Image (cartoon, rainbow, N blue to C red):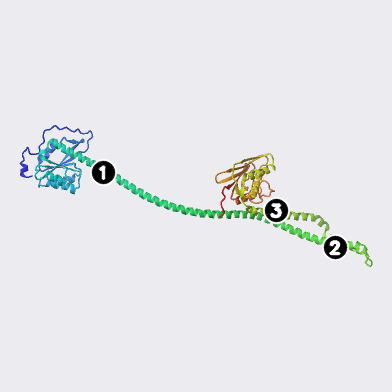
Amino acid sequence: MNSVDKNLKKDDALLFAEESIPLLKPNSKQIPGFKLLIVDDENDIHTMTKLVLSDYSYNGSPLEFLSAYSAKEAKQLIKDHPDAACILLDVVMETQEAGLDVVRFIREEEKNDKLRIILRTGQPGKAPEKKIILNYDINDYKEKTELTTQKLYTTITTALRSYAHLVELEKKTKEIADKNLRLNEEIARRIVAESNLTKYNRSLEKMIDNKSTRLKTAITALKIKEKELLDAHKSAAVGDISLVNITRLNASGDRLKENLDLMDRYRKDMTLLLEKYEILQSLISPPSKGNEAPVVKTASALKDIDQLKKDIDLDEILANYPDIIKDSSEGIEQISKAVNDIQCFIAIKDEPLKKTDVNRLLKAVCSELKEAFSPKIGLQTDFSDIPEINIAEKNMKKAFHEIIKNAFEAISSKGIVSVSTACDDTCITISISDIGNGIAPDHMDQIFKPYFSVHKPQGKGLGLSFARSAVLSGNGTFQLTSTKNEGTNVTITFPLSPAEDP
C-alpha cells in the first residue's frame, strides 16, 4: 500500500465495534470447515480478521483461514484451494488494481463461479463501488471502515450461505447430469435394443414365412407321399395275397393239368371201347342176307373188347374218375377263391366315400355277431354322439365285422367284448377290445399277413389285413395292441375333415 494508507488513523482503519453477537452452537457432528481466503498486504488486517472470526461457525462448521499478502500469492492460493468458499480481497496492494486482477483470474482463468468474492478497500475513491459492481463479477463490496464485527459476521454468513447454495446446486446439477447421462445411456440402449428387436422381428417374420412356405410344401409333399403309401399299401396287400395265392394257383393249375391229361387219356380209351361195343352191337343185330355168319364175327369182337378192357384197365378208370372230377372241381374252386380274395383287396379303393353313421354300422355288426357266438361272451357297447363322416360304407362294415368277429373268437369260454365310440374337435375314435387270449409277441409282426390266423389255424386269415387296408384307404389310422392271456385292443380314428387329395 502507499504511504497514505499506512498513515491512516486508527479510527479510519478496520474497526470492529463491541456488539453483542449470538454464538452459533456447532452441531454435534462436525463437518469440514469453510475455507476463508484473506488477501491483504497488511498483516494487521489478517490478525484482526482471524481474531474476530475465530469463534465463527456456519451450520456447525468453523472457518479455515488461508492468508495471502499479494495478488501473486493469492492466485497460487486459489489454485491450491479450488474449494475455497469465500475470499476477503483487498483492492489496492502491490498495484492499484491488484485485487481486481485477482477477480479476473478467479472468474476468467480459473472459471471458479462458486468462490464468493468480497472486495474490501480502504481507498474507495480508487475503486468506486458502482463501477466495480457493474464491471466485475463480485459478490460484495465493503469499505474497511464500515466492516464492524457484526457486519463482518453478516457479510461472511451471507457469502457462505450463497456458497453453500451454489455447492448444493452444483451437487444437484451434477446428480441431474449423471441421471440424465444414465437416462440417455438407457435410452440409447433401449433404442439399440428396439432396433435390434425390430431387426430380429423382421428376421423372425421372414424366417417364419420361409418356414411356413417350406411347411406348406412339406405338407403337400406329405399328402402326395401319403397317397403313394396308401396305394403302395394296397398294392402290398394285394401283392401279399397274390404271392401266397401264386403257389395255390400254380398247384391247382398243375393238378388240373394232370387231371385233364388223365381224363383225355380216359376219353380216348373209352371212345375206343365204345367203338368196339358199336361193332359188337352191329354184329348182334339180325344179319342181312349174303353176309358172313354173325357168330364168328361176334366171337372175334368180344375177344377184342376183353383185350381192350385189360389194356385200358377199365376198372381203374371207373374207380378213379369220380375222384378226378371232384379234385378238379376243388382246384377250380380254389382258383376262384384266390381270384376273389385278390379282387376284394383291389376293390377297396373303388368304393366311393359318402356320409355315414359309424354308430349305425357298428350296431348292425354287433347285432349280427352276438347271435353267432356263445351267450357266455358278453358284449358291452358305449356309443357316443358322433357326427356322420365320409367313409366307404360297405368296406367299413366288413372291416368292423372282421375285427369284432376276431374279438369274439379270441375268447375261449367266458369273457367280454367291448365296442365304443368317442369324438373330439378333430376326429372320431372307435375302440374294439376283448378280454381274451391275446396275441403272443412273436406273432405280432405276422397278424396282418394274409392267410395267417392266431385263433383259427384253419381260417382264411384275411380279416385283419382287409380291415387295416380298408381303414387306411379311408384316411383313417389303425392301431392294434395286445397282451398274451390278457386281451387285445384295436383303436381306429377318422378325421372329421378328411385331407383333400393333392
Query: In terms of depth relative to the viewer, which is nearer, 387 or 444?
Result: 387
For residue 66, side relative to residue 263 (left or right): left
Is residue 66 placed above or below 469 in the rendered structure? above
Q: Amino acid at mark 1?
A: Thr
**Image spot of residue 368 (x, y percent):** 68, 44
The answer to which quarter of the image holds residue 271 is: bottom right
**Image spot of residue 206 (x, y percent):** 44, 53
- Point 85% across, 62% down: residue: 275
- Point 26% across, 44% down: residue: 174
Q: Quadrant of the N terminus?
A: top left
Residue at disc 3, secondary structure: helix
Residue at disc 2, secondary structure: helix
Res 192 visible? yes
Between the residue at mark 3 and the residue at mark 2, the CA separation in whole angstroms equals 41 Å
Q: Amino acid at mark 3?
A: Lys
Which residue in the rendered view is the most extreme toward the bottom?
A: 290
- Point 66% across, 55% down: residue: 242
Q: Which residue is disc 1 drawn over?
A: 173
Residue at disc 1, secondary structure: helix
Number of residues whose C-alpha sits closer than 10 Å to that of mark 3, classed few (under 14), some (14–19) or many (20 or more): few
Q: Which residue is disc 2 drawn over?
A: 275
Q: Which mark is residue 482?
A: none
**Image spot of residue 388 (x, y percent):** 60, 46
Query: Who comes first in sequence, dot 3 or dot 2?
Result: 2
Between the residue at mark 1 and the residue at mark 3, the CA separation in whole angstroms equals 104 Å
Query: In terms of depth relative to the viewer, which is nearer, 224 or 245?
Result: 224
Q: Which residue is disc 3 drawn over?
A: 337
Number of residues whose C-alpha sits closer than 10 Å to that of mark 2, classed few (under 14), some (14–19) or many (20 or more): few
Q: Do the residues under discs 1 and 3 have CB atoms within 8 angstroms?
A: no
Q: Amino acid at mark 2?
A: Glu
